[in-house]
Amino acid sequence: MDFLFLAFGLVLLILGGEFALRGAIGLARNLNISPAVIGLTIMGFGTSAPELVVTIQAVLSGSADIAVGNAIGSNIANTLLILGAGAMIRPLICDPRGVRRDGAVMFLTTLLLCGLGLTGGIVLWQGVAMLGLLGTFMGWSYVQDKRHRDKATDLHEEMAEETSGIPTNLVLIATYIVAGFAGLALGANLLVDAAVALAKAAGISEAIIGLTLVAFGTSLPELAATMIAAYRRHADIAIANVLGSNIFNILGVLGTGALFGPLPFTPHIVSIDQWIMLAAAAVLLPIMITGWRVSRIEGAILLAAYATFIGTLTIRL
């Protein structure tokens, strides 16, 4: 029964995130906000909405281990599983300027999170600082896009225009937003409760559940978006979405979660999993820079690395 609640919670999270994202884009367009700003801000928030709501719900429920495991597991899945799967469909061509900027920030934020993990976790003032860093990055990116219109600017606009099924009527927009957030809230509640119950029944830690089932489930929207983008030959959008999602998962998701309560890191996450996340980020950068593409062979290597990671988790069960 818990697996059924877990699956139903994931479905509600995914549908809620999609409705909320489309409603937010529709509202932004009605307010005449530029496509570049929509791609930079709303798309970043929208694709990570499941992780964000699950993190808040987990902290409020006293299951902070799930929140931390979810964020770290999602970043590992984004880097290894999602980009690997996308490259297997079609080699992913990288935009040099976008990779240099967002890739570098992604690696630095990952390094920052590992440093925080060594201190034992994330507390309130650190969460506030992380949100401040996210706001600074987004503001800086917007200024860069506005001053120097280049491929990165075009990419942000493409990300906004790529999303279909956007409502235009204000009543419909409000319906999408309300329904989306309701689905996110209910889905997160079901998912966290089911994850805690499964962990207790199986005698494993909540952090492991967060790193695996919860992280994989909340990463499904990024997986679907990346595979569709790769199929449509919009590889630059696929890569930008993953890099942006990784940045937001660390600074936005965990930063917001820390506002609701401390986020302690378990010994296993501090000693193993956060370094796997950092290693995945470190391996991805040279892969993207070498030839400015992620080939099918490199995609297969990323997928094999993710399978190995999951295999190591089963040993720790």
Image (cartoon, rainbow, N blue to C red):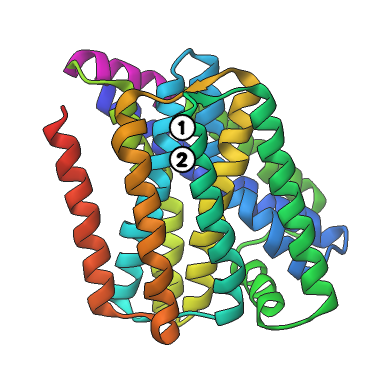
Q: Quadrant of residue 294?
A: bottom left
- The residue to which callout 1 is attached is 117
Residue 49 percent location from the top left of the image: 57, 42
Kindly check if marks 1 and 2 are in contact, taking CB atoms under 8 A apart as contact: yes
Task: Report the residue at 34% width, 26% height from top.
Answer: 207
Question: Crowding near pointer 2: few (<14 within 10 Å), some, many (20+)?
Answer: many
> Which secondary structure lies at badge 2?
helix
Secondary structure mostly seen in magenta is helix
Q: Quadrant of the C terminus?
A: top left
Residue 123 percent location from the top left of the image: 60, 22
Amino acid type at circle 2 is Cys
**Is residue 213 something that shows in the picture?**
no
Q: Is residue 5 left or right of residue 151?
A: left
Question: Crowding near pointer 1: few (<14 within 10 Å), some, many (20+)?
Answer: many
Q: Please tell me whether residue 276 is drawn above or below residue 262 in the rendered image.
A: below
Q: Quadrant of residue 101?
A: bottom right
- The residue to which callout 2 is attached is 114
Q: Is residue 230 magenta?
A: no
Q: Which span of residues is magenta-colored?
A: 190-202
Task: Report the residue at 81% width, 51% height from top.
Answer: 170
Q: Is residue 51 left or right of residue 283?
A: right
